[in-house]
Each structure stands twice: as structure tokens, then as C-alpha cells.
Amino acid sequence: MKKLILTTTILAVGATLLRADDVALLTFKYGKAKHQAVFEFYENDAPQTVANFKKLARKGFYNGLTVHRAFPHTLIQTGDPLSAKKDRSKIGTGGPGYTIPAEIHRKNIKGAVAAARLPDKINLTRLSNGSQFYVCLKPMPMYDGQYTVFGQVVSGMDTLDDISTKAVDSNDNPIDRIVIDSVKILPREKVPQLPAAPAAVAPAPVKSGLAKPASVVLAPMPPAPAKPKPWWQIWPSGGAPAPAKPAPVTPAPAKPAAVTPAPVKPAAPKPATPKPTPAKPAVAKPAPVAPPPATPAPKPKPWWQILPSGGAPAPAKPAAVTPAPAKPAAATPPPVKPATPKPTPAKQPPGKPKPATPAPATPAPKPKPWWQIF
């Protein structure tokens, strides 16, 4: 029984060692020739990511797909199943329909093969895309601690660098299709002209930053050659980080710079149209008010109109606005003569009545002359 257990353990360890020394042989077809590149796996650092890649490669998943992002001498990206179609509008957003947990341990050195993913804003746990991956053509320290590095190129860097220099469209997609003819998983010894596997070296520790995903930002995007890209094309589903094309490599800052969108070409300034100045309404000046005409003072009546002929003295009306007029003297009414008592006739004896003697007429008073009025 002990011998059986020991034999099984030895076989399992041997199989693991053999599987860990597998490599991926990628054959690209562009122009009129085929070109190859080989990378080895970091099985101990990213076991789930490596197992997933091998499974897809053995199923032929990558055959016929294209390189859909290329930055000269910096980075290339592939693995989107939508790139097999002619419609380029959605390339970079596809995948096998699932994601892989983050396994962030290795750095993005030259030749590093890493899984692409969505940005932190919509992917806080940094889950890797199920099929898309990118290859660093130079050290990319700004991506350390953010992406799962699961392999390293050991042959064919010149081929990958040549692919990165091809002409691209506004989405950094090579205009002439660069097709993956095949991806094969082979033991290292079956691939000709490959160096022996290096001795296992403990990887340098890389802070993943998963404890505080909100504080980690993505590296700046390179400027787009034509129009600015929408956010879903800047970081397509499972898209690789966009490197700066010609910019020199800068040391990794304590806090990576935030993603900046591609600069927008300013439109030609339009000549400013002068706005008409609104005319101020004329304020009508009030017409001068003419003072009311002065009422002329009434002329004093002549003396012959003061006491009309045969009448009583007329009361004088006060003159309007006349300077200190003399107060008229009070008119003295003419003295009234007492009436003369009529004699009572003596009673006559009956007989013939005597004719009545008429009463003497009382003469009417004469009006006073004017000099006696005042």
C-alpha cells in the first residue's frame, strides 16, 4: 500500500513538473509569410490564468483571431473573438463570456505576457478577461500591481516588435489584418532553438493594492491619431492598458497618474459675431407747464354805479387781491319819519253820513345826495 501511494505521488509530481515546463508557440500570418513567437508560463504565480489559457489554446479558440491593438515598440494586444469578424466597431469588447480572479504577483517587464481587463471604475476586484492578453515590448512599470502577468516571451520578440509598427486606424487596430494562425501548447524541449528553462527564482513582491482598489488609478492613455475614443474603447472589455507610444519610460510613481482621455482637436474658432447694442429708448422730457394767467384785479366801479338811481346803497363787494382797500363806511339808513296817527272820527248821530275827509298823503323820502352817503 505504501509503495502504491509513493508511486502515485512521484508520478503526480513528475506530471506537474512536465506541465509547468510547457510553452506556448504562437504563429502569426501577415504579408506573405508566417512568423512565430514563444512564451513560457508562470504556473506557480498565476495557476488559474495559465490553466485557462492552455484550455482555450488546445480547443483552437485563438485560431483566426487578429491583433487588434498595436503601439509602436511598446505593446500589442490580441485574444478578442470579435476580431475574427469584419465589423471593427466592437472589436476589443469581446471574450469567452467569463472572467478570471486576479493573480497579481509579477511585474510588467519587457516581454511580459499579461491578461487584459476592464478598468478599476467598473472592475474593483480587477478580474481578468477570459481570453484577451497583451505583450509588453518594453518595461511598463506603471502597470505593476494592476494586471495578472502569467507568462514571459522567450523567443520571437523581433516578430512582436515588427507587428507593433504596422499602420493602425483611429482605434489603434492594424489596418492590414495580422492573424493568429495557431497557438500550440508544447513541451519546451520540442520547440527548436529555445534556451533551457531558467532556475526558479522567487519573483519580486508586487503590491496588488486589492485592499484599496478605489485608490488605484490607471496609467495615461496615448493620444488618439484622429478623433477621441469613448470610454468603452479606451478600456474595452478585457482591454489591455494603453501605453504611451513614443514617450520614454518613467519610473513608477507612488501613485500612478489617472487615465486622461485622448486630446480633442480644437475646432477652428468661429469669428465672433458682433451683437447689436440695443438702442436705449428716448425718455420724453415733460413739457414745461405754463403758469396760470394772473387774474386781473377788478377795476373799482365809478361813483355813479355805486348807488343806482332811486335805489338803496349797494353793498360794496370786496375787491380781489387789491392792495389794502379802504373799508367802506357803513351806510346810514335814512331816518324814518313816524307815521302821523289818523284822527278817529267822532260818531255822528244817525242821519246822513258826512263825507270822509281823505287822509293827507305822506310824501316819499327823497334820496340823499352822494356826499351824504359817506
Image: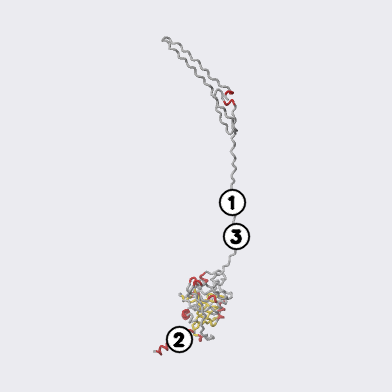
Judge whether residue 87 can be spotted in this image. no
Identified at 43% across, 87% down, the residue is: 9
Q: Image point 59% across, 41% down: which residue?
A: 289
Q: Position of residue 278 (x, y in %)?
A: 58, 53
Crowding around mark 2 (Cα neighbors within 10 Å: few <14, some 14 to 19, many 20+) is few
Q: What residue is drawn where x is 57% and y is 29%?
A: 327
CB atoms at circles 3 and 2 under 8 Å apart? no
Residue at the spot of label 2:
13
* Rendered position, 13 above or below 279: below
Amino acid of disc 1: Lys
Mark nearer the N terminus (3 vs 2)? 2
- Is residue 2 something one can see in this rendering? yes
Which quadrant holds the N terminus? bottom left
Question: CB of mark 1 within 8 Å of CB of mark 2?
Answer: no
Measured Cα–Cα span from mark 3 to mark 1: 23 Å
Q: Residues within 10 Å of mark 3 (few under 14, many from 20)?
A: few
Q: Nearer the viewer, residue 251 or 28?
A: 251
Give residue 310's quadrant in the image. top right
Q: CA distance from mark 1 to mark 2?
A: 96 Å
What amino acid is found at the position of numbered circle 2 in the picture?
Val
- Badge 2 marks a residue whose secondary structure is helix
Picture disc at residue 280:
1
Asked whether, in this view, residue 16 is left or right of residue 304, the answer is left
Name the residue carrying label 3. 272
Query: Marks 3 and 2: which is nearer the front?
Result: 2
Q: Secondary structure at mark 1?
A: loop
Going by the numbered disc 3, the residue's amino acid type is Ala
Q: Secondary structure at mark 3?
A: loop
Q: Residue 212 appears at what percent x and percent y?
A: 49, 73
